Amino acid sequence: MARLRDMYFNEIRPKLKEELGISNDMAVPRLQKITLSCGVGDAKDNKKLLENAIKILERVTGQKAVSTRARKSIAQFRLRQGMFVGCRVTIRGTRMYEFLDRFVNVVAPRIRDFRGLKDKLDGRGNYSCGLTEQSVFPEVDGDLLENTQGMNITFTIRSQSDDHSVALLKAYNFPFRREEVANVG
């Protein structure tokens, strides 16, 4: 079992239930899945870039990544419908909690000039953030990083509002930006 999963059921859920005034256990905010995606625009010219991005996602998450295709043709980018342009992976269950633990405790502090993540959600209770470099993950070898590649991470949370989702993420010690207090004196 993952450490954060046990922590959720034993500590976080009862605490959130009391704080948010929720009477039903099933209405307490809960992490459903984490989706990681990479857009590799140069994959149309160099297939090895897409293969490297897939290998990196597989090493980071521990499960197979899926390559994604372009939905529309865009002439300005010399892109045709159906061309491979990225990859993604969705993790659930134990792997999801293990990834969240690594993200909060290892990866986020390794981000260059890290001052915290924004606490702005999408209005449905889901949180998305982007990384400019994949080298912050300790699983990624330098030989796979031919060029700087970014990544999007989406945390899908089942909750009633953004405030409930933020309360859940803060309970997991998510590295949000701290409110800066102005020194008056």
Image (cartoon, rainbow, N blue to C red):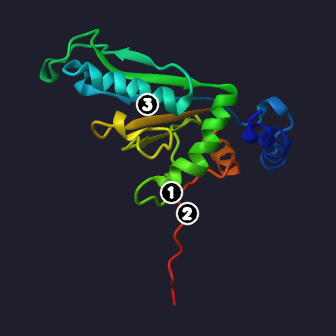
| Residue 88 position within the rendered picture, expressed as x and y whole percent measured from the top left | 45, 23
Residue 145 horizontal/vertical position (percent): 33, 37
- Foreground disc of the pair 2, 3: 3
Q: Which residue is denoted by mark 3 in the rendering?
A: 56
What separation in Å lies between label 2 and label 1 (alpha carbons)? 7 Å
The residue that appears at 21% across and 12% down in the rendered structure is 80
Task: Please tell me how many numbered marks the rendered image carries.
Answer: 3
How packed mark 1 is, by other alpha carbons closer than 10 Å (few <14, some 14-19, many 20 or more), is: some
| Amino acid tagged 3 | Ile
Q: Tell which circle, 2 or 3, labels the residue nearer the N-terminal end.
A: 3
Find numbered disc 3 in the image and state the secondary structure of the residue it sits on.
helix
Q: Identify residue type, mark 1.
A: Gly
Question: Is residue 104 in sight in this rendering?
Answer: yes
Confirm or deny contact between disc 2 and disc 1 (CB under 8 A): yes
Judge whether 11 appears above or below 43 on screen.
Answer: below
Of badges 1 and 3, the one in the foreground is 3
> Which residue does the image show at 25% across and 26% down from the upper left?
41
On the image, numbered disc 2 is attached to which residue? 178
Query: Which structural element holds mark 1?
Result: loop
Spot the residue most to the bottom. Answer: 185
